[in-house]
Image (tube, rainbow, N blue to C red):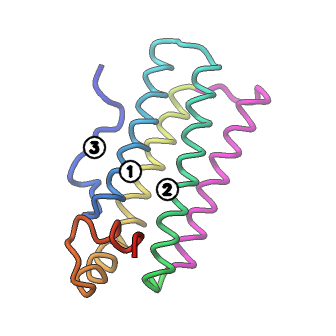
Amino acid sequence: MSKFVEWSGALSVGIEEIDEQHKVLAELVNRMHQAIHERHGSDVVKDILTELAEYTRIHFAVEESLMRILNYPDYENHKAVHEELLQHVVDLQEKVASGKTAIGFELMYFLKNWLTKHIMEEDMAYSDFFLKAGAQAKLKKKSWIQRLWSS
């Protein structure tokens, strides 16, 4: 079975650490899709949805921390988008837990669209800013975030 969310250069923001986190999010969506496709049962899918929600919170916290550290000018708007997306995921978890909605392919297409659209629109907007900030700090493109955290 092919992957539901295929990672490609179009999804890369050009910052290795962020791209790696985005790949984890894509893989969680792929795992959920596979579990639904193979009819693993709602408990397995609910567990993956919980893992996706938790990892999303961590990922958004990393992005927001970098935005604050680098004085990203659109920080407040990006943070508001993160909060809205997290609320959608929490709402989905509550609906699934209460039996008001089933985890099915409609949910999967929402998650796929949510992930790819967010990366390709909102996250691409900070990419150049982050990379320029890294270049100004005379750090290598692929590891400047890691060095920033360790300083």
| Residue in the picture at 49% in, 56% down | 59
Instruction: Say which quarter of the image contains residue 139.
Output: bottom left
Q: Which residue is mark 3?
A: 7
Instruction: Say which quarter of the image contains residue 103.
Output: top right
Instruction: Say which quarter of the image contains residue 79.
Output: bottom right
Q: Are marks 3 and 1 in contact (CB under 8 Å)?
A: yes
Query: Marks 2/3: CA distance?
Result: 17 Å
Q: Earlier in the sequence, mark 2 or mark 3?
A: 3
Magenta-span inclusion, residue 14: no
Q: Are marks 2 and 1 in contact (CB under 8 Å)?
A: yes
Q: Is residue 55 left or right of residue 9?
A: right
Q: Residues within 10 Å of mark 3 (few under 14, many from 20)?
A: some
User: Of the residues shown, which amino acid type is indicated by label 2?
Assistant: His
Query: Marks 2/1: CA distance?
Result: 8 Å
Q: Nearer the viewer, residue 136 or 89?
A: 136
Query: Marks 3/1: CA distance?
Result: 9 Å
| Residue in the picture at 55% in, 34% down | 107
Q: Which residue is mark 1?
A: 22
Magenta-span inclusion, residue 80: yes
Tell me, for residue 59, which label it has, or none: 2
Tell me, for residue 98, which label it has, or none: none
Magenta range: 75-103
